[in-house]
Amino acid sequence: MLQINNRRYDDILIVTMDGELDHNTATDAREELTGLIEDGSIRNMVVDLSGLQFMDSSGIGMFIGRYKVLKQRGGNMAVFGLNRHISKIWDISGLCQIIKIYKDLDESLGNIGGTKR
């Protein structure tokens, strides 16, 4: 099971994921996040993965797709809170070369979009 919560900070959508992001939950996650970023005034997304216990390759595709949408509108995506398992998947897949990983929410917000806030 996967639970997604969100809040907004200026043009940044802050998302918290808790549970497992796998082939059973990735479609629902993709649909929910896509619905949230349909609001064109959202340019950036920061995702807190500290509550995510498991992720498989389905999650990789889900993140890349939302990242592309944000990039097309001049925005960006950042994540933080990766556990050892999730971090390993991001490293092996090369996802960490595309979506920047930060240590916490403050650092993510301070760097999203390439400029300090």
Image (cartoon, rainbow, N blue to C red):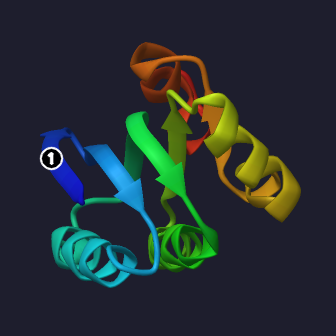
Relative vertical location of residue 54 with respect to residue 94 in this rendering, above or below: above
Residue 58: percent from left, percent from top? 54, 77
Residue 31: percent from left, percent from top? 24, 82
At 83% across and 48% down in the image, what residue appears? 91
At 58% across and 30% down in the image, what residue appears? 83
Please give left or right for residue 50 compared with residue 101 in the image. Answer: left
Label 1 Cα crowd, 10 Å radius (few <14 / some 14-19 / many 20+): few
Which quadrant is the N terminus positioned in? bottom left
Residue 15: percent from left, percent from top? 27, 45
Name the image quarter holding residue 57.
Answer: bottom right
Name the image quarter holding residue 64.
Answer: bottom right
Foreground: 36 or 93?
A: 93
Foreground: 106 or 32?
A: 32
Residue 71: percent from left, percent from top? 55, 70
Name the image quarter holding residue 95.
Answer: bottom right
At 45% across and 73% down in the image, what residue appears? 66
Please give left or right for residue 87 compared with residue 94 in the image. Answer: left
Amino acid type of the residue that numbered disc 1 sits on in the rendered structure? Asn
Q: Mark 1 = which residue?
A: 5
Please give left or right for residue 63 compared with residue 100 in the image. Answer: left
Q: Count the marks.
A: 1
What SS does tag 1 mark? strand
Foreground: 51 or 106?
A: 51
Which quadrant is the C terminus positioned in? top left
At 66% across and 52% down in the image, what residue appears? 99
Relative vertical location of residue 113 with respect to residue 115 in this rendering, above or below: below
